[in-house]
Amino acid sequence: MATDYDAPRVRDGEEEKNDTIVELDAARSRTTTSLLEDDTEPTDGLTLPGADLSDVQFEVRVIPKQKDEFTCMSCFLVSHVSQETKPGTSLCRDCA
């Protein structure tokens, strides 16, 4: 007996469903609409790209480079001297 792999599979205890494309499309659009409606609630603390932040004040404490740190000449990040490839090269291990 040959097996028809394109035939819909029905598990034990389930009935075969004969949904039309129109019914499936209607059910899909209802699901999509309900998901979009749930997602339209405003969220506090979230800023959108391009938002006007001119009235916001940022305070950042800048710590000067320490004696045991160096600035990589490739990526310009300040790293600990243990990350330097060779003493005096001013290249970090990631950039080497």
Image (tube, helix red, strand yellow):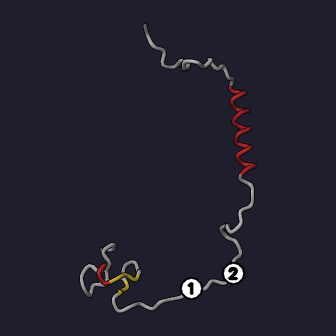
Q: Is residue 45 above or below residue 53?
A: above
Q: Quadrant of residue 96?
A: bottom left
Which residue sits at x=74%, y=55%? 40
Tell me the SS state at disc 1. loop
Q: Quadrant of residue 27?
A: top right
Tell me the SS state at disc 2. loop
Mark 1: give few (<14), some (14-19) or many (20+) Cα within 10 Å: few
Name the mark on residue 60.
Answer: 1
Amino acid carrying label 2: it is: Val
Residue occupied by mark 2: 56
Residue 91: percent from the left, percent from the top?
31, 80
Q: Is residue 60 above or below residue 44?
A: below
Which residue sits at x=54%, y=20%? 11
Q: Is residue 26 left or right of residue 74?
A: right
Residue 22: percent from the left, percent from the top?
72, 27
Q: Residue furthest top?
A: 1
Q: CA distance from mark 1 to mark 2?
A: 13 Å
Closer to us: 51 or 61: 61
Tally the numbered discs: 2
Closer to us: 4 or 74: 4
Which residue sits at x=65%, y=68%? 49
Residue 92: percent from the left, percent from the top?
32, 78
